[in-house]
Amino acid sequence: MNSREIQRIELVEYETRRFLESEISEELGMKIWQNYGNHISIDEPSFKNGNQWSLTANGWAGHIPLTPEFQIALLPKVEIRNLFGMLEYAYRLESLKFPEGLTDCDSLEEFYETLARLFALRVLDRGRKGFFRSYQPRKDRIPYVRGRFDVRKSCQKPWMVKPECCYEEHTSDVEDNQILAWTLRRILQSGVCTERSLPQVRRAYQSLRGLTTPIPCDPQDCAGRLYSRLNEDYQPMHALCRFFLEQSGPSHRIGGRTMIPFLVDMARLYELFVAEWLKAKMPPDFVVRPHEEVVIGRGGRVRFDIDLVVYDRDSQKALFVLDTKYKAPDHPGNDDISQVVTYAAAKDCDEAVLIYPKPLDLDVTIGKIRVRSLGFSLDGDLEEAGQRFLQDLLSGGDR
């Protein structure tokens, strides 16, 4: 194979594809299994599969640069246009002014690259205005007295000529900027961006390198932050940072480079999307609370993490317990039903609802708990699908 030729295979989520034994070497198969066994199910050639490689994407979408010559594209069943709509709600990106044509991208990689370029341009724009600075406490030995002179420490070591001082420094090396720098670095390592966006991403990263430190951070560091009029424009940038960091898969070395795949957990995205859509669209008489933890028994040994609970705003009574399931089977499984009934019982709630991307036939009563299945479709118009789901939810439940 010519070193410049890139072999690219495409896998649609939850669909199995087979490849000739000659198409994937044993070394590549081992790398897929070792690094991405949770994302892709892989069976080596044997008499069971006609001596072919068998690969199945396990509910992930994105791009894996396995080697410089071999890449794997994980394709979502959801249209790119609707994937964008899900991301917009899930990561609260509505405040961003997206360029026209963003939802017309032909692939997930192109979509990622377009968002990366938009993010880089935002960073560059802020750089032209001046990156956010704040006073940070410092304690150091310096050639002159600054701030508060620590007499006790200096007396303990009189041979040290430089005085130890406690002072505040006005600096741009703050967490707000560190998050931007770390995210840009991860984007550059993804291998997804091409010359359409790389110049802007590199310039944005270079504009921050001399001012702040790209300290590793988690997606959670991008959420729940406090802003003022001096840094309020950082909020949408941090929302994009959270998106990029959450979709960064496990890194691996390719030659002398560290490569980071772009991977979207579709089940997690569906859960976030449904939660944020309901919070935005639920009538004012209701309160939606995602990820409620319920602790049962002494010592808190039994804990439940409930996807969504809908409360009556006035009485604070739990009206609906909701559990989202991205992979829709032909009919709800017993495990799913048992789980949501347990959640409802723990919240003393009479309504338990399983949410799938397509409607399934389920409306039964177990004890005093009514268990239903409702569909929040990802086909067609998301807003219309959401309104149908909300109407079915509220009209079928007793307040």
Image (cartoon, rainbow, N blue to C red):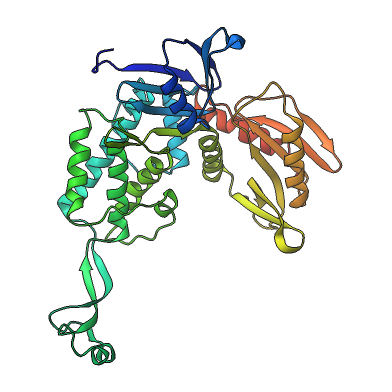
Q: Which residue is located at x 22 percent, y 41 percent?
A: 121
Instruction: Classify residue 274 as left or right of residue 142.
Output: right
Q: Residue 336's image quarter?
A: top right
Q: Where residue 179 sits: x, y (%)?
A: 32, 52
Instruction: Classify residue 234 as left or right of residue 28.
Output: left
Q: Is residue 17 visible?
A: no
Q: Which of 66 and 370 lies nearest the eye of the viewer? A: 66
Q: Quadrant of the N terminus?
A: top left
Q: Which of 111 and 194 lies nearest the eye of the viewer? A: 194
Q: Where residue 388 sits: x, y (%)?
A: 60, 30
Q: Where residue 221 sits: x, y (%)?
A: 41, 54
Please, is residue 202 above or below residue 287 in the view? above
Q: Is residue 331 visible?
A: yes
Name the residue at the right extreme.
367
Please, is residue 63 above or below residue 295 in the view? above
Q: Which residue is located at x 20 percent, y 51 percent?
A: 208
Instruction: Classify residue 43 as left or right of residue 35.
Output: right
Instruction: Classify residue 83 as left or right of residue 291.
Output: left
Q: Which residue is located at x 54 percent, y 41 percent?
A: 281
